[in-house]
Image (spheres, rainbow, N blue to C red):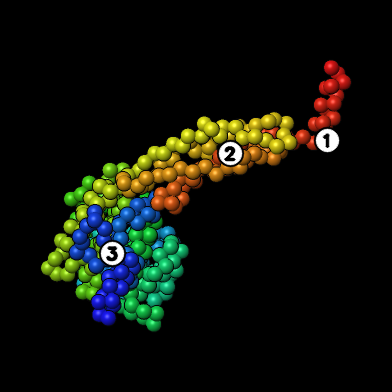
Amino acid sequence: MKKIISFFLVIFLTFFTVNPVDADDIRLYAKSAILMEVETEEIMYGKSEKVFMQNASTTKIMTCIYILNHCNINDWAKVSSNAASQPRVRLGVHAGEKYRVKDMLYGMMLESFNDCAVVLAEYAAGSVENFSKKINREATKMGAKSTHFVTPNGLDASNAEGAHGTTAYDLAIIMSKCIKNQSFLNITRKESYSFQDSSGKREFTCVNHNALLRSMDGVISGKTGYTSKAGYCYVGAVEKDGIKMIVVVLGSGWPPHKSYKWSDVKSLINYGTSQYEYRNVKPDISKIRKIPVNHGTKKYVSVRLSEDEVKLFLRKKDKIEISCKIIPSIDAPIKKGDVIGKIQYNKNKKCVHETMIISRENIAGKDYWWYFGELLKDFMI
């Protein structure tokens, strides 16, 4: 009996065990990670990418983009006692002081100052609680549906709805939207920035802590993070070998392993460029240049493609199968621009792109007046 049970257990494991790592995969320190192509949002690599995790100061990319989209960055924001009492890392603002919204954004994104984030949250929504509701709604609109932010700075916290956190996938979606905002890029790419409070008595200089800006070519933007629960985290955007990618690592080591996250990021980027490419595909439609027309003033309608060549993002080992879906003939009348069929580009039996087959011309139907005209022609002959 034991042998029979063991036999069926082997069969079960053979057919139903899911192996998350294939032969050409990579090893990471991170507990959760994702590599995503920006335009298609295709997941190039994922490791527990939809598992809810603490994400530390990477939260600040959401705070930043919300402020840029909804607030006047030249306004003055007043510091509350709550903002002034935030734990390290902090700028050291004092209750009652006023700072430009823009300056607080630089302090938050370059040095990851927790007090700057709270100043911005209270300026935008009156309280941290109200601001959290706003950025959670904003994240959902972006497509980040598993995100629950309790704080604007990413410090570990909980409320009635649960703990502060998100997923690597959601952070990639958020970051893909952030890098389309030029002001966001201007802030997060700045090497250093100086500013004063409204009185002019206090002056500060912030230095960018995103080490990849100085150590890797093609870095577009990024934000680091760390808490005791989240571990070392990073979310960023990189363009290498013509591929624009979002990279996220969460729980990538704990002290003293501060450099693990950089090792993970570089491994992911190298993996992406070695495994993926953009490929131009041009279908041959010579056999369908003319489609028979039923009851039309012309026997055939000439056609064209909505795009002669398509650019697909693929794994280098992917094979594309092209199929044509078109009716053998079409009834008149036909208008120029009418869709007659489509070309499908299939990867692993799944359609990844479609190109429309379109009429090049107008063709009228054979109605009463057409037949009457033909009769007149016969009499005239």
| 292 displayed left or right of 203 | right
Q: Secondary structure at mark 1?
A: helix
Which residue type carries mark 1? Tyr
For marks 3 and 1, the one nearer the N-term is 3
Task: Please tell me the numbered disc located at residue 368.
Answer: 1
Q: Secondary structure at mark 3?
A: loop
| 137 displayed left or right of 60 | right
Which residue type carries mark 3? Asn
For marks 1 and 2, the one nearer the N-term is 2
Question: At 20% across and 61% down in the image, what residue appears?
Answer: 28
Q: Is residue 356 above or below residue 268?
A: above
Q: Is residue 135 above or below residue 306?
A: below
Alpha carbon distance from label 1 to label 2: 28 Å
Alpha carbon distance from label 3 to label 1: 68 Å
Q: Which residue appears farthest toward the bottom when viewing the image? A: 160
Which quadrant holds the N terminus?
bottom left
